[in-house]
């Protein structure tokens, strides 16, 4: 690469866009005396502000992008701990979901309880290449002893980066915090363990006064030891936004660009971890992918602290929409996991949760059911039978009509095309008469599956027909 000086700064050819560029100045730590809490942006007694300066950065999606999972770490911070057997089962399912290309690249674990450590050992015994097994610790030498005793190859380290945490929680200066974090990272490297630095609260941090200088120091340690150091940008409070021209530290594109471009962190070592406080977890994670972050860190069904994390299942379908395929992922495992959570773990998934809720592809409107009956593409987001093993169905109420009832029967019983009923079927007509009577008597709730099955059995007996052999599953 040919370079020349211009105003004492080197000019070089960008190999990606083939344009000449001038190297920016090196960013050094701004060791401020008072914390910068961006009060104009985060007034606390008011709703946070989203200011714009119309400075934009280019998209730079990596050659490969993937998902990492925090179900066993952040996902356990808002619910009762999983049992060892439950963790191992879910880990096995992640292996199936990620497929042969390891799209679920890693799972992170707590190491603090014996139950957690037992689960890690059992998952290690599986011998899977993916998901890789990694841990999470505080920036503490005592915590690192756990990592060393478990024989972990990689660990996450909490390195809070906003002045809210550095000054107000840790009671340190920026330099003191940086020196402390670097000493723990160096200890990891001395033991041959690859650190993953979790930059907590990055969307309230001084990106160019602290985050970039800190990442530059981490890259120096990486060069010194020859061991990769990953950077996880953590939108701990969900303040990140994906809007073009928004001001940092709220700008997700601006954060990813700064760490990759100005701190020289490779895309494959950059990861985004978001929360859903402002309903932006999925859009922000996708934006991180688009602007140079190879990994997005998620939790199954979004279960996590406060409003939760980016849902793992959501990013499976975000990937497919961006890349045009699933790259070997088995998306039907998502439904298997949802069933496992409901039936074994006892966790109730809200009915309208996309992809996994009981009603996510259920229609109650008769006119919609009529469209589905004629061609399910009209009202179904994609072939949910193929990708989630969940055919579209209609809930039965006073607005379902003949079409809704016919659609429910066809899908619940998984009737073959030549077996399917339509609006003129005697069974459908008789069932609608019964449904209408229920609502004329004052009923206000939708019909349950159990009620419908009982009535269908009654009407089938009256009509001398049978649908049982085609009902979903063999045990129903």
Image: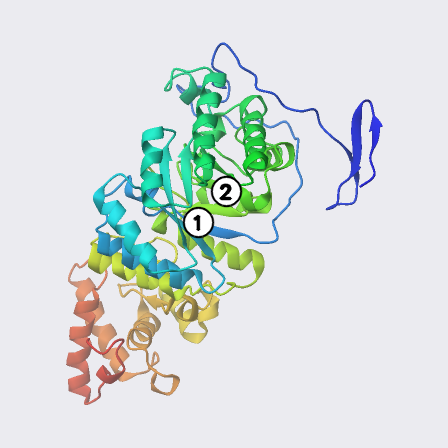
Label 1 neighbourhood size at 10 Å, few (<14), some (14-19), many (20+)?
A: many
Specify whether 353 is left or right of 12: left
Could you say which is closer to the camera, residue 22 or residue 408? Answer: 22
- Report the residue at 44% width, 49% height from top: 68
Residue 282 locus on image (x, y percent): 46, 46
Query: Is residue 128 placed above or below 210 in the rendered structure?
Result: below
| Image quadrant where residue 400 sits | bottom left
Q: Nearer the viewer, residue 111 or 461?
A: 111
Residue 447 image-quadrant placement? bottom left
Residue 87 visible, this angle: yes
Marks 1 and 2, the one that precedes in the sequence: 1
Residue 48 visible in the snapshot: no
Q: How is the image coloured?
A: rainbow
- Residue at position x 62%, y 33% from top? 245
Residue 85 in percent (x, y) is at 23, 56
Splitting the image into 4 quarters, where does residue 181 fall? top left
Residue 186 picture location, percent across and down:
47, 31
User: Residue at the location (16% across, 86% down)?
Assistant: 462
The residue to which callout 1 is attached is: 68
The residue to which callout 2 is attached is 271
Disc 1 element: strand
SS at circle 2: strand
What is the residue that sits farthest to the top in this orientation? 33
Q: State which quarter of the image contains the C terminus.
A: bottom left
The count of marks equals 2
On the image, the x and y values in percent for residue 305 come to 32, 38
Marks 1 and 2 in Cβ contact (< 8 Å): yes
Relative height, residue 455 to residue 161 (above, below): below
Q: Residues within 10 Å of mark 2 (few under 14, many from 20)?
A: many
Estimate the spatial distance between the alpha carbons at disc 1 and disc 2, rounded to whole Å. Answer: 9 Å
- Picture quarter with the N terminus: top right
């Amino acid at each position: 690469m040919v370079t020349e000086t211009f105003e004492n700064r080197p000019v070089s050819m960008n190999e990606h866009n083939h344009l000449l560029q001038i190297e920016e100045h090196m960013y050094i730590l701004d060791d401020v005396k008072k914390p910068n809490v961006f009060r104009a942006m985060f007034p606390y007694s008011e709703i946070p502000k989203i200011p714009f300066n119309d400075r934009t950065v280019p998209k730079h999606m990596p050659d490969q992008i993937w998902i990492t999972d925090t179900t066993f770490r952040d996902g356990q911070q808002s619910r009762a701990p999983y049992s060892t057997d439950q963790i191992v089962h879910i880990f096995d399912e992640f292996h199936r979901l990620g497929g042969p290309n390891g799209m679920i690249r890693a799972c992170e674990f707590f190491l603090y309880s014996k139950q957690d450590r037992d689960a890690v050992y059992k998952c290690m015994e599986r011998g899977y290449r993916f998901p890789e097994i990694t841990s999470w610790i505080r920036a503490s030498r005592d915590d690192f002893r756990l990592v060393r005793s478990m024989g972990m190859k990689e660990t996450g380290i909490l390195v809070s980066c906003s002045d809210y945490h550095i000054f107000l929680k840790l009671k340190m200066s920026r330099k003191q915090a940086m020196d402390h974090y670097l000493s723990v990272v160096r200890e990891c490297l001395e033991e041959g363990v690859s650190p993953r630095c979790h930059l907590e609260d990055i969307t309230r941090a001084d990106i160019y006064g602290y985050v970039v200088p800190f990442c530059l120091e981490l890259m120096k340690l990486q060069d010194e030891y020859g061991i990769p150091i990953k950077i996880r940008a953590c939108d701990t409070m969900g303040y990140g936004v994906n809007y073009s021209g928004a001001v940092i530290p709220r700008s997700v594109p601006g954060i990813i660009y700064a760490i990759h471009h100005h701190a020289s962190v490779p895309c494959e070592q950059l990861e985004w971890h978001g929360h859903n406080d402002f309903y932006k977890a999925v859009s922000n994670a996708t934006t991180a992918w688009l602007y140079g972050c190879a990994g997005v860190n998620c939790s199954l069904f979004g279960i996590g602290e406060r409003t939760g994390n980016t849902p793992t299942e959501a990013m499976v379908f975000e990937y497919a929409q961006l890349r045009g395929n699933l790259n070997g992922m088995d998306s039907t495992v998502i439904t298997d996991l949802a069933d496992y959570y409901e039936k074994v773990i006892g966790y109730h998934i809200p009915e309208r949760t996309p992809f996994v809720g009981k009603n996510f592809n259920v229609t109650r409107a008769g006119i919609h059911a009529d469209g589905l009956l004629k061609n399910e593409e009209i009202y179904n987001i994609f072939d949910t039978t193929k990708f989630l093993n969940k055919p579209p169905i209609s809930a039965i109420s006073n607005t379902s009509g003949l079409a809704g009832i016919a659609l429910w029967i066809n899908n619940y019983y998984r009737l073959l095309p030549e077996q399917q009923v339509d609006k003129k079927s005697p069974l459908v007509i008789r069932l609608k008469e019964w449904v209408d009577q229920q609502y004329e008597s004052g009923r206000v709730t939708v019909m349950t599956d159990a009620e419908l099955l009982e009535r269908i059995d009654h009407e089938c007996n009256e009509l001398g027909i049978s649908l049982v052999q085609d009902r979903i599953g063999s045990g129903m």
